Image (cartoon, helix red, strand yellow):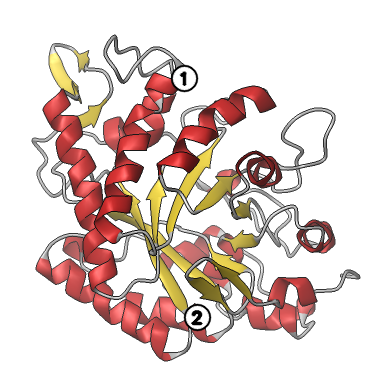
Amino acid sequence: MSADVRPLFEPITLGPLSLGNRIVMAPMTRNFSPDGVPTEDVVRYYQRRAESGVGLIITEGTTIGHKAANGYPHVPAIHGEAALAGWKKVVDAVHAVGGKIAPQLWHVGNVRRLGTEPDGDVPGYGPMEKRKDGKLIVHGMTQQDIDEVVQAFAQAARDAKAIGFDAVEIHGAHGYLVDQFFWEGCNQRDDAYGGSLEKRGRFAVEVIRAVREAVGPDFPVIFRFSQWKQQDYTARLAPTPELLEQFLKPLSEAGVDIFHCSQRRFWEPEFEGSNLNLAGWTRKITGKPCITVGSVGLDSEFLEYMVKTDKVAQTANIDDLLVRLAADEFDLVAVGRALIVDPAWADKVREGRFADILPFSRDALKTLA
């Protein structure tokens, strides 16, 4: 590495959120919370990253209090006495070592499958009904369903603030519920939530407004979005800067403080004719602080590790990232797999110990190191 790492470790204040540096731990599902309750291992997992120099931790996706919110085994919830008590221990442990932490509020939508915990009889919920072999596998959401989910997001944010989290992130990316409403392919509703890009964004706007009302004007609200989704890695929600502006402006005006802009590879330009990545364009359009993310510090992207593989991701040069950060293309940098495998990643980068950074393989997902 030849670029100056100091910009990565400069403090920053974003409204009421003051961070010791620009490093964010990206939200990454770990499946180590039986019955939705974070364990002592989860507490130590997050605390280790905070004490090793991560400025802001965004937790793995936490399911809101709706019967169809969950899609996977052993993911944490952000509702119910036991789960909230577990998260309170995480928050206190992170704060004890000087860190900041935000939960990612999550509803998986139509990704949910019958048989999934906690109630296997509950189908997925989504913008449109879906049946297979005569069986309902996705419930098309009614207005009442929409209102209930919006309020569940709001309650999760309210509870998160009450137990001491420093911010909240709404998961609006990667083909989950909020994102499902954005896409014309899976949202062909003929009511106020379907049709134009503006109408398809209405559900997200209502969620953001409800969360903002629940936490008040001075509590940071982060919104994560992506151009791609897990069902189609080449998809583009907004293929031009003009459409991206049309997409982002209502979300910004609804109450988003910080945009978390998910890319597969942070270094890829978002549109022809400009070197700006997705976070750079989002910052330019909205004027809001932005987090960049996507294969930071590793030589291969995370999608390659979503299937069984023996491949190992080696440490990659972050000079381009540092140059972009120093040029104010974005404000914060989210690090994913590199922080799963190496809790001391931030310290090692700050101290120039690049040769000591651990490579990533799927084996790292088997434990909470």
Task: Count all numbered tags in the image, as a single digit.
Answer: 2
Query: What residue lies at 27% left-to-right and 43% top-to-bottom?
Result: 71
Residue labelled with disc 1? 197
Q: Tell me the quarter of the picture where residue 169 sits.
A: bottom left
Q: Amino acid at mark 1?
A: Leu
Q: Amino acid at mark 2?
A: Ala
Separation (CA) of disc 1 from disc 2:
39 Å
Residue labelled with disc 2? 50
Residue 187: image location, x then y, percent = 35, 18
Q: Earlier in the sequence, mark 1 or mark 2?
A: 2
Q: Give the position of the N terminus as an image quadrant.
A: bottom right
Residue 63: image location, x then y, percent = 26, 52
| In the rendered image, the vertical position of residue 336 relative to residue 177, given as above or below | below
Q: Secondary structure at mark 2?
A: helix
| Residue in front for this viewpoint, 195 or 184 | 195
| In the rendered image, the vertical position of residue 193 relative to residue 315, given as above or below | above
Q: Tell me the quarter of the picture where residue 146 sits.
A: top left
Q: Is residue 357 left or right of residue 37?
A: right
